[in-house]
């Protein structure tokens, strides 16, 4: 096997550290395993291709988050389905694998997946700790829009989970 | 209810085996992105364009009738123009997804690139199909009957059949091309458009 270049080694280490970002976002947008695998592969391809241009002006995690969302939104051809609407049994291998995940966590993921596509991006960014100004920049909305929308989405999610 | 805390529980466990197990797999990762597909299609279209152009030249040499030469010369000219347009468009297409721009910007760029490619192909089809069909009909007539073109055109059935064939072939070809583009890219373009429109309408709405 050919030796890894320092850049490849560095990239692989960074992806390993932040692979949760990719898994979380893919699971928010894709339902079936095939689509998930395609999305993961595409994000990795785009990340590796774009890594040379990563100048470190932002954290790698932020860069990877942006790249993952941009890839998800420009890659998928079919309408994002959710398990409830498609009539499939709610089987979440990835969530089930998370032995420590509570039922609440699984229900939250399910509720997020029932939101419109853009709202899923907003709430994922918000729940992962990005401030409104950063979310606005990532998505292309104004800060005011983001603040109000995030507030509404959170309210909706809490109502759904409590109901 | 603390949504942030609940959200944080997801993905805590390490992913078994990791996303990439080593360099070999990193090299094996292939893209299925529509934009990469369009780039590849443009390369294939350009190669075919060159092969077909050479074919037209060969046919003009073997069938030196002015009508055939005129027909194929027109098609050849369009072909060359479209090959250059294809090369230019391929160069303009983004090579990969950009993390430096917002989702809205990126979706607009990708939507515009795929739309432009489809428009170019349809534009080419409208010009090339009728002339190619008429030229092919004339050539087939010569080949099949062993007569020269002048003799064939003395019978009114020949030009009438040629026009009908060219019209039918062109409509069928354009319809098929539209159908193929629709199957391959319409859902993708529609999805992008919906999300672009939603973001733009939200931007323009002052929420208070």
Image: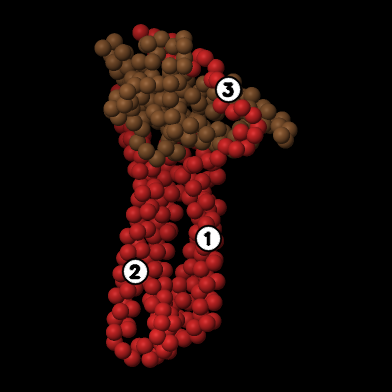
Say which label, 1 or 3, has the lower sequence index.
3
> Callout 1: residue from which chain?
B
Q: Are marks 2 and 3 on the same chain?
A: yes
* Mark 2 secondary-structure assignment: helix
In the rendered image, the quadrant that contains the N terminus of chain A is top right
In the rendered image, the quadrant that contains the C terminus of chain A is top left
Q: Is A117 situated above or below B180?
A: above
Q: Residue at x 43, y 33 (%)?
A: A35
Give the x, y percent position of residue B35.
48, 45
- Cα separation, mark 2 vs mark 3, equals 55 Å
Query: Which residue is identified by label 1?
Result: B46
Give the x, y percent position of residue B66.
46, 86
- The residue closer to the viewer here, A98 or A114, is A98
Q: Please name the color used to draw chain A.
A: brown
Give the x, y percent position of residue A125.
44, 22
> Callout 3: residue from which chain?
B
Q: Residue furthest right?
A: A3
Q: Please name the color used to draw chain B.
A: red
Query: Which residue is identified by label 3?
Result: B17
**Label 2 with label 3: CB-CB less than 8 Å:** no
Residue B169 numbered tag: 2
Q: Residues within 10 Å of mark 2 (few under 14, many from 20)?
A: some
Which-is-in-front pick, marks 2 and 1?
2
Residue B158 numbered tag: none
Q: Are marks 1 and 3 on the same chain?
A: yes
- Cα separation, mark 2 vs mark 1, equals 22 Å
């Amino acid at each position: 096997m050919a030796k890894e270049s320092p850049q490849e080694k560095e990239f692989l280490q960074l992806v390993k550290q932040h692979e949760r970002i990719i898994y979380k976002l893919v699971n928010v947008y894709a339902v079936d395993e095939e689509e998930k695998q395609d999305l993961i592969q595409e994000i990795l391809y785009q990340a590796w291709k774009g890594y040379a241009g990563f100048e470190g002006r932002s954290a790698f995690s932020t860069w990877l988050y942006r790249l993952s969302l941009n890839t998800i939104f420009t890659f998928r051809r079919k309408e994002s389905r959710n398990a409830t609407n498609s009539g499939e049994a709610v089987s979440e291998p990835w969530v089930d694998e998370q032995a420590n995940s509570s039922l609440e966590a699984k229900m939250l993921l399910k509720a997020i997946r029932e939101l419109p596509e853009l709202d899923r991006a907003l709430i994922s960014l918000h729940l992962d700790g990005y401030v409104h100004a950063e979310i606005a920049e990532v998505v292309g909305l104004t800060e005011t829009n983001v603040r109000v929308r995030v507030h509404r989405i959170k309210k909706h999610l809490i109502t759904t989970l409590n109901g | 209810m603390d949504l942030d805390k609940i959200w944080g529980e997801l993905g805590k466990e390490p992913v078994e085996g990791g996303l990439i197990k080593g360099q070999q797999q990193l090299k094996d990762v292939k893209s299925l992105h529509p934009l990469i597909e369009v780039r590849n299609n443009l390369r294939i279209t350009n190669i075919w364009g060159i092969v077909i152009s050479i074919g037209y030249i060969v046919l003009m040499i073997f069938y030196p009738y002015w009508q055939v030469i005129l027909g194929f010369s027109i098609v050849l000219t369009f072909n060359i123009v479209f090959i250059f347009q294809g090369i230019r468009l391929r160069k303009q297409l983004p090579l990969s997804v950009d993390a430096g721009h917002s989702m809205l910007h990126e979706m607009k760029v990708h939507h515009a690139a795929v739309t432009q490619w489809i428009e170019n192909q349809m534009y080419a089809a409208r010009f090339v199909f009728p002339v190619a069909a008429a030229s092919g009909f004339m050539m087939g007539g010569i080949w099949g009957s062993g007569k020269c073109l002048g003799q064939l055109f003395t019978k009114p059935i020949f030009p009438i059949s040629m026009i009908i064939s060219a019209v039918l072939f062109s409509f069928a070809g354009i319809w098929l091309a539209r159908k193929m583009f629709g199957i391959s890219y319409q859902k993708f373009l529609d999805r992008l458009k919906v999300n672009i429109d939603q973001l733009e309408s939200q931007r323009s709405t002052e929420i208070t």
